[in-house]
Image (tube, rainbow, N blue to C red):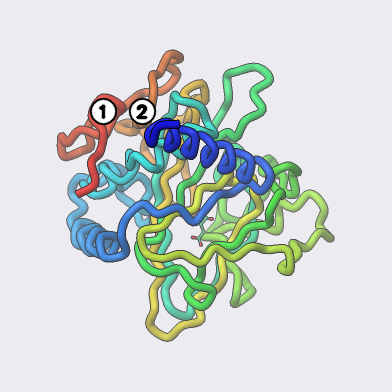
Amino acid sequence: MSASEQSTVQTANQRNADIQFFNENGFLGPIKLYEPEQAKAILQKIRLNNLERSHILFDNDVNYDRHFDIPELTQHIGHPTIVEKISSILGQDILCWRSEFFPKFPKSSGTEWHQVSNYQYATGTPMLRPTLENYSGPLDLTVWTAFTEATIENGCMKFLPGSHKKLYYDESKDVGRGRTEQYRSVTADSDFFGYDFQEFKIDKDWIPDENEAVSMVMQPGECVIFSARCVHGSHPNVTERNTRFAITARYTPTHVKVYSGMDTFQAHGSFFDLSNYGCVLVSGEDHYKHNKIRTENNLGERFPTPANRFVAP
Ligand SMILES: O=C(O)CCC(=O)C(=O)O
């Protein structure tokens, strides 16, 4: 076998191992995207660019979709390793439908255990709707990238392996806290950004088994890919001065309708006007044309679409 044939076989083997691991566990990682120094340099630019908010898509504190006005994130969402890894799970035709900031400041609580399928928990209306009959794959994949170290002490992510195969939470429940009123968690070590995720539990007596949890310790520049259906959360940040900072990008197949029938929404205590919102096609083609597609960010820079692939600096 030639060297190039050998490497093709190795790549195929790795891909199959990744798919098998993901199918069994609901997450995959850590996966290296950037060298640690490169990640820290990108984070510095993100922090600087975060101060300039005149081209922001949603003018609120939640920091959704800053890939529309922060050039480093415009590029990041189409990182070739992300696209390669997620396309082996979601198929070739993929949209990025959201990005989010996840800072965890010193002495702040962990993210409460939760499980999400169609993001209905946020408003009461599903944000993702598959249009393929009998579709059984993941509705979306999250790529959570650490731009600082993520340790057990500063609040790394944790997952319950295999929990994506069963629903432990029902997002369609009619809850008040979070949707109509801002909620501050009463427990010091766990919180869910203005909601009480316990309210969505199907079996109120079910308690996630911390002994089963896998903690995802990561270097700056590494990511973990997961289905939001895999029960997940994060540790509290118990350090004095070590902020953990991560950015998630969320991806869905092109047959899924994103924010269908919604012009605006209210979630996590903030208002979102979808007038200029669009998904970004990061891989393949959009045969369905269900969603508005944005090809440029708000600064007029092109997203790294399949024809215009990102090259790491
Ligand atoms: O970063 C965290 O603490 C939570 C992240 C999370 O829940 C998510 O990305 O879905």
Res 55 quadrant in image: top left
How far, Cα to Cα, is label 1 from label 2? 8 Å
Residue 272: percent from the left, percent from the top?
Answer: 39, 42
In percent of width and height, residue 42 lies at 24, 58
Residue 75: x and y in percent read 26, 43
Q: Residue at x 46, y 83 (%)?
A: 239
Residue 295: image tag: 1
From the viewer's perspective, is residue 185 above or below residue 248? below
Quick one: SS at disc 2?
A: strand
Residue that carries the numbered disc 2 in the rendered image = 281
Label 1 CB sits under 8 Å from any ligand 1 atom:
no
**CB atoms at circles 1 and 2 under 8 Å apart?**
yes
Q: What's the amino acid at mark 1? A: Thr
- In the drawing, what numbered circle is on residue 119? none
Looking at the image, which residue is at 61% across and 56% down?
A: 232
The image quadrant of residue 148 is bottom left
